[in-house]
Image (cartoon, rainbow, N blue to C red):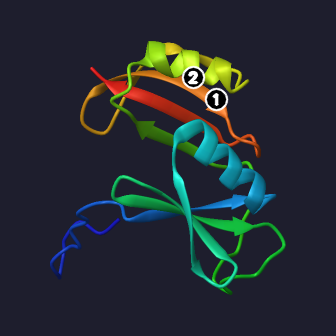
Amino acid sequence: MPSHRTAMPITVQSLDHVVLTVASIPATIAFYERVLGMVAREFKPGRYALHFGQQKINLHEVGTVVDPNVRHATAGSGDLCFLTHTPLDEVLVHLAAEGVAVVQGPVGATGAQHRLRSVYIYDPDENLVEIANEV
């Protein structure tokens, strides 16, 4: 790492979207809409994204080349954290009603700006999904 800078560094403001590689786009859409209330939208023919708040998750299905720059797309390698205002006790009731097993939690965690109280679940590809309240 250089000890001096010759140009102004990039200043990142926020996260717009991430890409999640999945085994089945329909199964992933069904899970995230049913369990987390996200909304799926087709943004190009055959390309889907899950929308929530001001962000989205673009979905890339294994075996489908959507971008030649993608080198190591692997289903089940994601680890995502979603903030919610829904109290975790209500989240747990909802997860149980949907038949979604809790991997861990509620437990304390550290977020980008605040301490978190979190529960962890797996999505259909076994991506780790953290659902958290800021505390």
Which residue corresponds to the image point at 38% horizontal and 19% vertical from the top-left? 87
Q: How far apart are marks 2 and 1 (CA)?
A: 12 Å
The residue where tag 2 is placed is 94
Front in this rendered view, residue 12 or 9: 12
| Residue 115 visible in the snapshot | yes
| Residue 102 visible in the snapshot | no
Q: Which of marks 2 and 1 is nearer the N terminus?
A: 2
- The kind of residue tagged 2 is His
Which residue corresponds to the image point at 29% horizontal and 69% vertical from the top-left? 2
Which residue corresponds to the image point at 27% horizontal and 20% vertical from the top-left? 135
- The kind of residue tagged 1 is Ile
Left/right of residue 104 with respect to residue 14 in the rendered view: right
* Image height of 16 relative to 65, above or below: above
SS at circle 1: strand
Q: In which quarter of the image is residue 134?
A: top left
Left/right of residue 36 with respect to residue 117 in the rendered view: right
Q: Mark on residue 121?
A: 1
